Amino acid sequence: MKNITISVDDELYRQARIKAAEESTSLSAMFKAYLVQITGSEGKETEFQRLQREEQELRAELVARRLSLNPAHNLSRDELHDRHALH
């Protein structure tokens, strides 16, 4: 991620800070949203969004297969060995 430095007059900065506070956001987030909008990249998935989507898909698949991420459902070493020996 790149950092950008811009120069603006004091009054514009003050008004922008007020606007950001009213929207419960930051100037950086507002500026990023603006850049996304003008570059047309708003439909593109960010790395975080991709990972979040993949996690949701994996969790849904585990639920569909009746598997779980609950540690209580993990097999012990002996159970795993016995299960492997059956195959």
Image: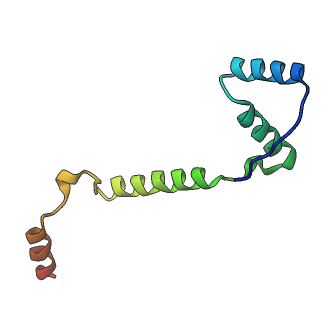
User: For this view, does 24 lie left or right of residue 16?
Assistant: left
> Which x, y percent locates residue 35?
82, 43
| Number of numbered callouts drawn | 0
Whether 40 is drawn above or below 58: the answer is above
> Which x, y percent locates residue 47?
61, 55
Q: Colour scheme in the image?
A: rainbow
Comparing 82 with 78, the one in front is: 78
Residue, x 16% and y 78% (percent of image)? 84
User: For this view, does 71 lie left or right of residue 45?
Assistant: left
Question: Where is residue 85, by image quadrant?
Answer: bottom left
User: For this view, does 81 lie left or right of residue 56?
Assistant: left
Question: Where is residue 87, by image quadrant?
Answer: bottom left
> Which x, y percent locates residue 53?
53, 52
Residue, x 52% and y 50% (percent of image)? 52
Residue, x 12% and y 76% (percent of image)? 81
Residue, x 11% and y 80% (percent of image)? 86
Whether 58 is drawn above or below 6: the answer is below
Comparing 46 with 85, the one in front is: 46
